[in-house]
Image (cartoon, coloured by chain):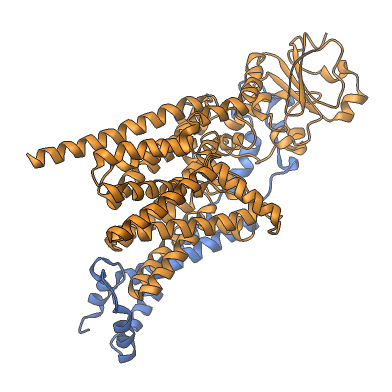
Chain colours: A blue, B orange
């Protein structure tokens, strides 16, 4: 290939993006799992509406009426999936670069060249693609 | 001169398509305005517009609402489905609701956006706007697709005009749920595949493919099923052509789309894989009756009840055209052959999967209607174009034949409306008329939707729900005591099998309930 590592990365940017997306997806699912486990399904016991509204009754001015519910639900909405997704994507940068470096080292092996040549057959649209061999 | 003519022709074609869209909307919009909000449709609004609350209204939740002797302010129910000033354009609540529900959030976010523009108000048109948006996307895709296949926008007028009279589409126009959006996304997915096969899978097309996967998956979980069917046919196509390089690019971009969806909404794993709410668990095997149901479904929803006639005429025409082509030694169609194959195969696979899972439920089968309409139109175009290529001749013949075949029931939209909805609309309006009264609900089985009367009951001033035993055991005066405005008249929704109080006036009987009016109930 006769390219430097960074030229190789520029050429294979989509692989880097792919690996980071894999890490982000893993983080998102882990975050969702964590949030799902601690979900407190709303029950009447959780509701403190009576304490928050005078006379134990909703008047027309109490907005929002379900202030008791809101307090509980907002706590549940931690968005762990987004947070962990971002964390994993950032943490994934180093392993992704390592994986890219290993691929760079073996890129010109004959076996891989043969596979690439074989896959390129019958191709009519190479220039317009995202993935290049 | 020729160039001017061609420019004028192009302009004239687009103008005719725009006129077709206007006629289509003229048929759809008045119908949308008069839809009765019944059944699951109230969920469209409650899940989109409630900040944070339980999904369902069960006995425990009702007991937890501040009340006096069971009477609570009906504004709480209204708050369930209206956007208020404090939660306008607040999408966290929408996301949270969908997380614990069974649908992805895109449709509800669109509904919340429309409702946020008009806080504190309700209209069927808020959901209707999103449905119309979906139909306009479908119209646009038809135009672009027919331009590619037949080098002419004008042929798109045929499916555009048939949309408001096709049985399946009519049922969805009256359904204020996410299924028209799902149809638009599925058709976009199909469109990308057809166009890419003709023009090649370019980078631009692959990026569009990723975007379609993301938006489609966030619209409805059945998009996965339809996308699977189309993808299956496409993969077989790549393998037969031995285009592995294209296949790898296709799978790569598809995976990027799916991973993006998982990052945005990982809860689809709980909804689809873990079946969070235990839906679609009763699967009935195939037997003669089910096959009969399938044929009936296809006839009613695909061909507006004209299936036999349409298929008979199509078969005769196809034989004539094939004979003509053979005698004249004309070449067979090439440009749209794969479009036919991928559309027909994916739609049939989808039909079989969904019919096995859910039977002939019109909304779950909705992704089939537009591809069928495409095949229907493409078939008529194929027949007419065999004899002439001049669009000025083909277009009128095309329009007349299409409308004559499926549209000999042009009034099907309004037939449907007349047959089903007036009673429901009257039931809605009755509640609006008596909104200053209090409401007593007796013997409701499903409290989470108030036995499909949620919208009606929310219109009143104060509300109380009791079961049949409570009604029989207590005297009415005790039941009615505790209201803030004790002098208000009362409207009662009483289950049909229970007795109506002597001094009450029966207003209407519907959905298994007697709606009765009692003046100054507490006195």
Estimate the x, y position of residue B208 in percent, counting from the top left: 34, 55
Q: Position of B422 compared to B480: left or right?
A: left
The answer to whether one can see residue B189 in this image is no
Instruction: Tell me which residue sits at (31%, 82%) in the image.
Output: A116
Q: Which of A119 and B276 lies nearest the eye of the viewer?
A: A119
Most extreme residue toward the right is B473
Estimate the x, y position of residue A70 in percent, counting from the top left: 61, 38
Which quarter of the rendered picture does the C terminus of chain A lie within? bottom left
Estimate the x, y position of residue B515 in percent, counting from the top left: 75, 20
Which quarter of the rendered picture does the N terminus of chain A lie within? bottom left
Most extreme residue toward the left is B1
Estimate the x, y position of residue B77 in percent, counting from the top left: 65, 28
The answer to whether one can see residue B504 in this image is yes
Instruction: Tell me which residue sits at (64%, 14%) in the image.
Output: B433
Task: Examine the rendered structure and indicate whether residue B249 appears above or below residue A69.
Answer: below
Q: Which of A9 and A112 lies nearest the eye of the viewer?
A: A112
């Amino acid at each position: 290939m006769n390219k430097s590592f960074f030229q190789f990365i520029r050429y294979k940017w989509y692989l880097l993006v792919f690996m980071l997306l894999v890490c982000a997806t893993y983080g998102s699912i882990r975050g969702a799992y964590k949030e799902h486990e601690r979900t407190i399904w709303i029950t009447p016991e959780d509701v403190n509406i009576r304490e928050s509204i005078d006379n134990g009754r909703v008047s027309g001015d109490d907005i929002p009426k379900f202030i008791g519910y809101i307090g509980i639900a907002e706590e549940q909405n931690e968005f762990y999936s987004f947070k962990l997704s971002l964390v994993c994507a950032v943490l994934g940068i180093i392993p992704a670069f390592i994986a890219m470096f290993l691929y760079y080292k073996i890129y010109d092996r004959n076996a891989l060249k043969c596979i690439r040549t074989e896959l390129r057959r019958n191709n009519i649209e190479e220039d317009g693609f995202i993935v290049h061999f | 001169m020729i160039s001017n003519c061609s420019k004028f022709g192009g302009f004239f074609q687009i103008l005719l398509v725009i006129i077709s869209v206007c006629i289509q909307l003229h048929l759809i919009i008045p119908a949308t305005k008069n839809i009765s909000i019944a059944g699951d449709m109230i969920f469209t609004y409650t899940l989109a517009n409630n900040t944070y609350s339980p999904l369902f209204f069960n006995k425990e939740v009702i007991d937890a609402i501040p009340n006096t002797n069971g009477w609570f302010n009906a504004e709480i129910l209204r708050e369930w489905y209206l956007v208020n000033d404090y939660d306008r354009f607040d999408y966290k609540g929408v996301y949270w609701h969908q997380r614990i529900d069974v649908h992805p959030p895109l449709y509800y976010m669109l509904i919340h956006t429309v409702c946020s523009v008009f806080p504190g108000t309700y209209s069927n048109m808020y959901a209707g706007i999103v449905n119309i948006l979906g139909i306009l996307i479908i119209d646009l895709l038809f135009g672009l697709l027919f331009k590619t296949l037949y080098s002419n926008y004008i042929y798109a007028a045929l499916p555009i005009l048939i949309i408001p009279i096709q049985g399946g589409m009519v049922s969805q126009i009256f359904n204020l749920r996410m299924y028209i959006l799902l149809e638009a996304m599925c058709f976009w997915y199909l469109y990308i595949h057809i166009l890419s096969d003709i023009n090649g899978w370019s980078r631009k097309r692959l990026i569009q493919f990723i975007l379609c996967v993301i938006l489609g998956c966030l619209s409805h979980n059945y998009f996965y099923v339809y996308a699977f069917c189309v993808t299956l046919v496409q993969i077989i196509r790549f393998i037969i052509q031995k285009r592995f390089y294209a296949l790898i690019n296709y799978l790569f971009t598809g995976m990027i789309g799916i991973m993006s969806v998982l990052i945005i909404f990982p809860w689809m794993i709980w909804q689809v894989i873990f079946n969070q709410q235990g839906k679609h668990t009763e699967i009935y095997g195939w037997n003669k009756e089910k096959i009969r149901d399938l044929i009936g479904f296809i006839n009613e929803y695909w061909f507006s009840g004209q299936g036999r006639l349409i298929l008979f005429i199509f078969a005769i025409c196809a034989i004539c055209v094939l004979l003509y082509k053979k005698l004249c030694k004309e070449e067979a169609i090439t440009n749209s052959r794969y479009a036919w194959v991928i559309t027909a195969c994916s739609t049939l696979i989808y039909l079989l999967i969904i019919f096995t899972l859910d039977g002939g439920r019109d909304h779950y089968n909705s992704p089939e209607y537009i591809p069928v309409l495409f095949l229907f139109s493409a078939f008529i175009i194929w027949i007419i174009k065999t004899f002439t290529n001049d669009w000025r001749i083909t277009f009128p013949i095309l329009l007349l034949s299409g409308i004559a075949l499926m549209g000999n029931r042009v009034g099907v939209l309004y037939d449907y409306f007349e047959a089903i909805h007036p009673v429901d609309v009257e039931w809605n309006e009755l509640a609006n008329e008596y909104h200053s009264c209090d409401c007593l609900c007796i013997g409701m089985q499903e409290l989470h939707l108030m036995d499909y009367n949620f919208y009606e009951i929310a219109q009143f001033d104060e509300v109380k729900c009791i079961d049949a035993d409570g009604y029989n055991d207590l005297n009415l005066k005790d039941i009615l005591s505790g209201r803030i405005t004790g002098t208000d008249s009362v409207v009662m929704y009483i289950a049909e099998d229970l007795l109506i109080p002597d001094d009450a006036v029966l207003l209407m009987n519907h959905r298994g309930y007697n709606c009765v009016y009692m003046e100054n109930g507490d006195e």
